[in-house]
Image (cartoon, helix red, strand yellow):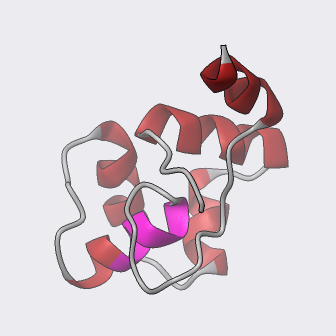
């Protein structure tokens, strides 16, 4: 089962992949401000495009496969 990411972990995963938030939004046909709001915690991703974006970021469970996963350093920290 996929572990959910915090917004901070999602940002870190994007950094490790060398992707900007804008790149991620374009790649998944998402509204860029919506992704920024999710990652800053100003939007909870409860419905519509925000929900789809949260699922793709791995912040929420849904019927979409997350496009991001835990960075290796973060997953080892969780085991400790």
User: Residue 11's image quarter?
Assistant: top right
Which quadrant: the N terminus?
A: bottom right
Q: Which residues are magenta?
A: 52-57
| Along the line of sight, the residue nearer the viewer: 21 or 77 | 77
User: Residue 66's image quarter?
Assistant: bottom right
Q: Could you say where residue 38 lies in the image, as x and y percent from the top left?
A: 33, 52
Q: Is residue 28 left or right of residue 19?
A: left
Q: Could you say where residue 45 lies in the image, as x and y percent from the top left?
A: 24, 64
| Along the line of sight, the residue nearer the viewer: 21 or 17 | 17
Which quadrant: the C terminus?
A: top right
Q: Is residue 38 left or right of residue 22?
A: left
Does the magenta-highlighted stretch encompass residue 25?
no
Task: Note whether 34 is above or below 5 in the view shown.
Answer: below
Task: Note whether 46 is above or below 33 in the view shown.
Answer: below
Q: Main secondary structure of the magenta part?
A: helix
**Residue at x-position 50% and y-position 83%:** 64
User: Residue 23's image quarter?
Assistant: bottom right
Q: Is residue 70 left or right of residue 73?
A: left
Extreme-top residue of the structure: 80
Q: Could you say where residue 24 lies in the image, as x and y percent from the top left?
A: 63, 65
Task: Note whether 25 is above or below 68 in the view shown.
Answer: below
Does the magenta-highlighted stretch encompass residue 56?
yes
Task: Note whether 52 is above or below 13 in the view shown.
Answer: below
**Residue at x-position 75% and y-position 24%:** 76
């Amino acid at each position: 089962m996929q572990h959910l990411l915090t917004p901070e972990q999602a940002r870190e995963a994007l950094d490790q992949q060398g992707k900007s938030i804008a790149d991620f939004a374009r790649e998944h046909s998402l509204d860029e401000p919506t992704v920024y709001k999710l990652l800053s915690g100003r939007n909870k991703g409860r419905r519509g495009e925000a929900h789809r974006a949260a699922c793709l970021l791995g912040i929420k469970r849904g019927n979409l496969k997350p496009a991001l996963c835990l960075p290796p350093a973060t997953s080892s920290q969780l085991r400790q």
